[in-house]
Every structure is written in structure tokens, then in C-alpha cells.
Image (cartoon, coloured by chain):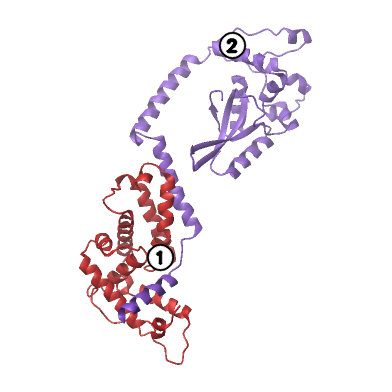
Amino acid sequence: MSEAHDSRLSELYRESSQETPPARLDRAVMDMARTSVRRRAFSPFGGHWLAGGALVGVVVLSVLLILEVPQQPVRYDVVPAQDAVAPASDAPLRSLKEIMQPGRLSSGVPVETEEKREAPTAPEPRFEFHETLSDRDAAVPEDATRMRAQQPAAAAEEPAAVAGASPATGHYLQAGSFRDKAGADALLAKLTRLGFRGDIQEISITTADVYHRVRVGPFEDLEVLDKSRQALAERGIETQTLEGRE
Amino acid sequence: MLRYAGGDLDAFQRLYEQHRGGLYRYFLRQTNRSVAEELFQDVWARVVQGRRDYRPQAAFRTWLYTLARNRLIDHWRREGVQPGGYPAVDDDGPGMAAVDANPGPQRLLDLRDCLEQLLQLVTGLPDMQRQTFLLRHEAGMSMAEIAEAMSTGAETVKSRLRYAMNRLRAAIAKECLEVES
């Protein structure tokens, strides 16, 4: 009799005991597991090696940077910031078309006349890679050349997202990376309001782990990229350069 | 678990889905809700952190509930709480039912009353009996697995479970055992 009662008790207990953890606990646990897997994926040799490797990397990059720094500062005329485009009291605002001249953006030499625009005086090339980039610029069609420019006014004129429409080459500035799409959308919207154009790139670290990388660009001209980075930093958005051509 | 130890997140998710309910209720029967949530999350954090130390000699379930039990004991010790309000000595004895929950014959019991009463009675079991009962009913562990998780012998586990069932049976309203659900 007691055995029958015991199984009845067990049955009753199973019926009564139905609580499950709340969804936020599920999320918290899965986040922990995900973070752990990712952290290990990035540091196959463990934390100490990673720290050591990072230090070596910083030293090597610093040396390279010192070697690559030009002797004299290069003068840029185009500042892709809204403030810079604001009308100054002593000088009339140049037309948008003039500001947007690709020649100006690449060479950094102000163009005053039509003749000069036809034959811009190229500055003494300092680095081979700049030359290479300029050459590549020349091959980019007019539309694409305009898109690379980060002029706030120009960006406001055109649709913000250039994903898919952008040329497959060029450097980007990464403004952020988000697991949730909404965060990425919000940052892209902010960038658009500030007059920058960019897109969201989906990065899969594992099949279950997708990141949304918010990029500004693409940039054909590293000088323009650099100016944009400064302009973004002034607005409190730190970025890092995404190298390579994808 | 070995697959998760190798970085397979889907494997972890399957393990988690399989054990989330049982582990949560294991804590819920022995603490209050907020403590249960905290301990639950803590144990999974230990699983995540310790995945590289996991050895397949032990079933994952046994390992999980060993972590859970240690965490619970640790919590009680830190809070200075006597588990279940029962003295640790005399814990394995048959004991007396804490309350005589049998209502008068006039009262008509429905199933809901029975379920509620049973949960209270389980919570009120002496510590070792309650843990044994929960490992059996929430974790679904065998006697051998419970013995391993509780670092004791299989015979002890059997006695504890028998005492727990006797206690519950004696305390619960007679009608609850008669009614067919």
C-alpha cells in the first residue's frame, strides 16, 4: 500500500512542481556561456600570452608609426565637419560643388580656377602607398568618388545607407559593434544625423554569434579617412580603422 | 558537455534546456525565490568557468548537482541559516511530521490544495531528506548518482529517501493519496 502511495506522491509532486526560471535568467546564463566561448576563441593561448602579444604588437606598431610619420605636417583644406562648413563672416561659403571636387579631396590643394582644376599641381609624393591610392581614386567612377567623401552637407542630400551600393574596395572606420541589431541601427542613425554615411556589416563569429558592425565609409583616400576620424572623435565617437579591401 | 568544453555553444544550450527547470526548482524548494535565482545563475557560471575541468567520468548531471549542493551549503553557512530550520543532528531519523495537515472530514480537498500542501511539506523536510528527495524527483538521478553527488553510500541514500516519503505520506491529507488525478 505504501509503495502505491509513494508513486502517487511522486506523481503529485511532479504535478505540483512546475516552476521554470524566468526568461531573464535564461538570457543571463546563455550570455555567460557565449562570452566564455568567444573569449577563448580569441585567446587560444590563454590570457597571459594574449597580454604579452598585445604589448609586442603595440611596440611594433609604435616603431612603424614613428618611421612613417612625415617630416612636415601635410596641409589639408577639407575638414569634413559641420562646423567647418558653417559660413564664416569674412569669407563667403564656397559652393558645394566646388568643395566636393574629387581633385581637392585627394590632393589637398585648393582649386581656384578652372584651368588649375584641369591640371592640378600634384604634391611631391612622399609615400608610395599614397600614390597607389591616388591612382586607384582616378579609376573610381564619379558617383563612387562622391560617396567616399564624408562631407556632412553632401551626406544629407543623399540616402544614408550605402550598403551594397558602395564600391567593394576602400577602408572603413568602425564606430561600434553590437550583438543586437537595434544598437547598431541607433548608432548608424546618429552618424547619419551628424552627416556621415556608413553601413552595418554582419559579422559571424560562430553560427550562433552574430555581430553588427557599424562602419563609416568606404574611404578611398586615407587623408579623408583621417579627417573623418578626427571629426567623429570631436563628437565623442571613437573609431578604429578597418583595413583592407573586401 | 564535452562538446561545450570544446567551444560548442549549441551543446551548452541543449544541456541548459535539459536541466534548467530541475535545478531552478531544486533551489526554489530550499530557499526563497530571489536566493534561488542567484544560486541558479551562480551554478551555471561555475559550469561555464569550469567547463575545461569537466571530466566525463562523472555524468554531467551529477557534476551539476554537486556544484549546486556545494553552493547551497555555502550559502547557508555564509548566511548563518540553519537549512530548513531543522537541527543537523537526528537528520537521518524518521522523525515526526512537522504538521498534521490532515483537515477535518468536512473539508472537501481539491487537487490544487494537495499540490500546494505537498510543496510545503517538501520544503519542510529535514535537510538531507529534502536534498535526497529533490535529487531524485527534480534531477531524476539514480540512487548511485545521488550517493555520488552527496558523497555518501547508496544505502544511506535509500534510507533517506524512504524516510522522506514516509514523512510526506504521513503528513499529507489522506484524500490527496486517494484521489486519482
Give the amino acid at mark 1. Arg
Estimate the x, y position of residue B74 in percent, counting from the top left: 30, 60
State the SS at label 2.
helix
Q: Is residue B99 above or below residue B3?
A: below
Mark 2 or mark 1, which is nearer to you?
A: 1
Q: Residue at x 63, y 37 (%)?
A: A188
Q: Hue of chain B?
A: red
Looking at the image, which residue sits at the far bottom? B106
Q: Position of residue B128 (x, y in %)?
A: 27, 69
Q: Are marks 2 and 1 on the same chain?
A: no
Q: Chain of mark 1?
A: B
Q: Nearer the viewer, residue B136 or A122?
A: B136
Q: Which residue is mark 1?
A: B25
Residue A55, horizontal then vertical, whole percent: 38, 28
Residue at left offset 35%, top offset 48%: B1
Say few, some or many: other residues with alpha carbon within 10 Å of mark 1 (under 14 / 14 to 19 / 20 or more).
many
User: Observer-nearest residue: A246 or A192?
Assistant: A246
Q: Position of residue A54 (x, y in %)?
A: 40, 29
User: Is residue A90 in sight in this rendering?
Assistant: no
Which residue is label 2 attached to? A131
- In the rendered view, tell whether residue A218 sits above or below residue A178: above
Colour of chain A in the rendered structure image: purple
